[in-house]
Amino acid sequence: QITLKESGPMLVKPTQTLTLTCTFSGFSLTSSGGGVGWIRQPPGKALEWLAIIYWDDFKHYSPSLQSRLTVTKDSSKNQVILTMTNMDPVDTATYFCAHNDFGAYYFDYWGLGTLVTVSS
Amino acid sequence: SSELTQDPAVSVALGQTVRITCQGDILRTYYAIWYQQKPGQAPTLVMYGKHTRPSGIPDRFSGSNSGSTASLTITGAQAEDEAAYYCSSRDSSGNHWMFGGGSRLTVL
């Protein structure tokens, strides 16, 4: 059974760097293929894809946020880490991580999400 | 265009059929993916590929594609189908994802 869970600060100040961790189980990001993506959702608004990291360490980022995003993985801990620099109140959102099966173009398992508020 | 467009709000009478649409040029290349999201919950995958439902998704959900328009049809809508529905696709590079603005379905 695949599960994912996001963790990180609930509140960050403007200009700070956000670091979120996705801890997963039921699959491996070493040799089994697939990847973990990050998606966010501002309150009352639509989903927005942010980034993805694959088992072979290939990464892709949203073109509009690429300069601010970094995604890494710690396969020994079954974790994926997302950092976003220079946080702004418009970045207030629920941040989700989700599993992408090998060769698939959808996210089949999602974490519950974590709400991050950007405010001074 | 590089966007996916959805009607913000859709309604259906209980037990009737409703079609939720998603428009975008990229859908001529890739099949749309559909997610259901209920308030306070994470999205749930309900349709992918030409018309593939993940395990556990009722067969009243079906998908279709025509040109630049993808549709998610619910035949015999139930109260529990009331939710926001998002379409999604990869972009033309194949390396990035995009989401539509979402359609909020009300079951009357």
Image (tube, coloured by chain):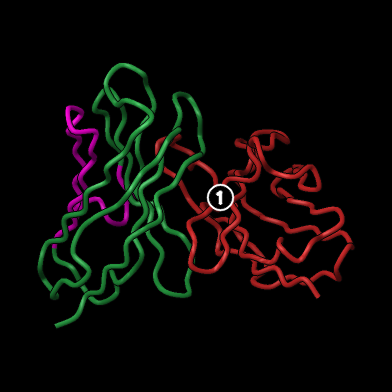
Amino acid type at image mark 1:
Thr
**Residue that extends furthest to the right in the rendered view of this protein:** B16
Tell me residue A87's x, y (percent). Answer: 18, 68
* Disc 1, SS: strand
As drawn, A31 above or below A51: above
Which residue occupies the foreground of this view, A111 or B48? A111
Q: Residue at x 14, y 60 (%)?
A: A85
On the image, which quarter does residue B94 sit in?
Answer: top left
Residue B46 is inside the magenta segment: no
Residue A69 is inside the magenta segment: yes
**Residue that extends furthest to the bottom in the rendered view of this protein:** A120
Q: Residue at x 16, y 71 (%)?
A: A12
Tell me residue A48's x, y (percent). Answer: 42, 58
**Residue that extends furthest to the top in the rendered view of this protein:** A31
Give the class, few, some or many, for how many residues have Cα within 10 Å of label 1's Cα (few <14, many ≥20).
some
Which residues are the magenta region? A61-85
Tell me residue B92's x, y (percent). Answer: 49, 39
Q: In the picture, which chain is green? A: A
Tell me residue A10's x, y (percent). Answer: 22, 69
Quadrant location of the C terminus of chain B in the rendered image:
bottom right
Residue, disc 1: B44
Q: Colour of chain B?
A: red
As drawn, A23 above or below A119: above
Q: Residue at x 32, y 48 (%)?
A: A5
Which residue occupies the foreground of this view, A61 or B83? B83
- Asked if one can make out residue B23 in the rendered structure from this viewpoint, the answer is yes
**Residue that extends furthest to the front in the rendered view of this protein:** A1
